[in-house]
Image (spheres, rainbow, N blue to C red):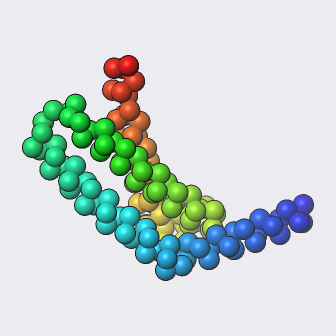
Amino acid sequence: NYEESEASGAQRCTMSKIVRSWQFEGFFAAVIITNSIFIGVQVEHAAVNRESSSPEANLFLQVSAVYTVLFTLELMMRVAAGGLRVFCNNERAWRLLDLVVVISSVIEMVVGLLPLQTTE
């Protein structure tokens, strides 16, 4: 048990170093910015092309899925590094926002996949 606890502590320490690094923060800042641009392109496309079955719809769904996976991975890594305490510390507002973004993205992805299942 002690060895498992020590290994778990070392893994958490390593994960903590990763999520606090400027590379991690910079990468996910870039993901947020590109996701914002993507949402703008998606909204513009939807306004111009009112057909939900346009050829780009599938591409938009795939790109959204990539962003959902990335945001989910970020949150999971932060929780792996700090445990559930990440929702109670001084950055709790950001983690709760992350949680809302991940949950809503997963719901949006599932809802977006439903029409694909009924047409097959």
Residue 54 is left or right of residue 47, and the answer is right
Q: Quadrant of residue 60?
A: top left
In this view, 48 is above or below 101? above
The image shows residue 74 at horizontal and vertical percentages of: 51, 61
Residue at the spot 68% in from the left edge and 73% down from the top edge: 14
**Front-most of 89 and 61?**
61
In this view, 51 is above or below 92? above
Quadrant into which the N terminus falls: bottom right
Residue at the spot 26% in from the left edge and 38% down from the top edge: 57
In this view, 27 is above or below 74? below
The image shows residue 87 at horizontal and vertical percentages of: 53, 63
Q: Quadrant of residue 35?
A: bottom left
Quadrant into which the C terminus falls: top left
The image shows residue 18 at horizontal and vertical percentages of: 59, 73
Residue 72 is left or right of residue 107, and the answer is right
Residue at the spot 37% in from the left edge and 69% down from the top edge: 30
**Front-most of 84 and 79?**
79
Using the rendered image of the protein, determine whether residue 99 is visible from the camera's viewpoint.
no
Residue situated furthest bottom in the rendering: 22
Residue at the spot 49% in from the left edge and 80% down from the top edge: 22
Residue 16 is left or right of residue 73, and the answer is right
